[in-house]
Image (cartoon, rainbow, N blue to C red):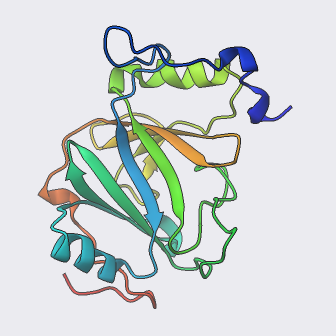
Amino acid sequence: MGQAGVLSRSHISKSDFRGGRPTNNEFQLRGVNHLALVCRDMAKTVEFYQGILGMPLVKTIELPGGMGQHFFFDIGNGDCLAFFWFADAPEPIEGVVTAAGLPGEGDITTAWGSMNHLAFDIAPEDFDDYRQKLIDKGLHVSPVMNHDDSEYTVAKELHPGVFVRSVYFRDPDGILLELAAWTRELGSGDIAHPPARADGSRSPS
């Protein structure tokens, strides 16, 4: 039985609004950490989201091996809208919507205009317990990804340069989900890469 069978009908119930909004008694989620989409041209994406919509660009990542880029825009309340630019992303085709593998386990490239993954924000102190909780619930989860600014953008161990910790898993339809915990404040030093054009060239800073 796949992950769709993890929840039985006995788990399905109406939310109890007595005494206010219902609460999540399993995971203390703090909202959406970031939503990761895929763009054709990162430079045009920056021009639109930062230049036109006014969203501050708060983090840039150059993916290893010429794979592409990952940029984050602040959308308020500590939440982010993120974009991947993949050097070899397929053209947008209906049905090409999910990454082939979990981060750390396989190819995460998806087509332009796709939603690559959805990340829920959690407190750093809950990270290890929540990852184990997912495992205990029968989900296949990724290795712990300590994202940093090293050549391969991830570290085996937590260190002061790590800016977010992540664990990835899928829903029953194969949608890639993430629990993400920021581990430090982002600053001007986190904007360090010129955005890529559709042909792979880099725009001047």
Q: Percent position (x, y) of residue 166?
A: 46, 39
Q: Quadrant of residue 28?
A: top left
State left or right for residue 187 relative to residue 8. Answer: left
Q: Quadrant of the C terminus?
A: bottom left
Vertical side of 162 occupied by 123: above or below: above
Q: Quadrant of residue 70?
A: bottom left
State left or right for residue 173 relative to residue 123. Answer: right
Q: Quadrant of residue 88?
A: bottom right
Please give the name of the residue rendered at 74% of the width and 20% of the height, measured from the top-left corner: 9
State left or right for residue 114 relative to residue 31. Answer: right
Vertical side of 47 occupied by 30: above or below: above
The reply to whether residue 18 is visible in this rendering is yes
Q: Percent position (x, y) of residue 74?
A: 22, 55
> How many numbered tags mark residues here?
0
The reply to whether residue 162 is visible in this rendering is no
Please give the name of the residue rendered at 38% of the width and 86% of the height, measured from the top-left corner: 197
In depth, the one of 119 and 193 nearer the eye is: 119
Vertical side of 192 occupied by 52: above or below: below
Please give the name of the residue rendered at 70% of the width and 47% of the height, measured from the top-left corner: 173
Q: Quadrant of the N terminus?
A: top right
State left or right for residue 134 relative to residue 55. Answer: right
Which residue of the protein is positioned furthest toward the top in this rendering?
19
In depth, the one of 92 and 167 nearer the eye is: 92
Which residue of the protein is positioned furthest toward the right in this rendering?
1
Vertical side of 183 occupied by 62: above or below: below
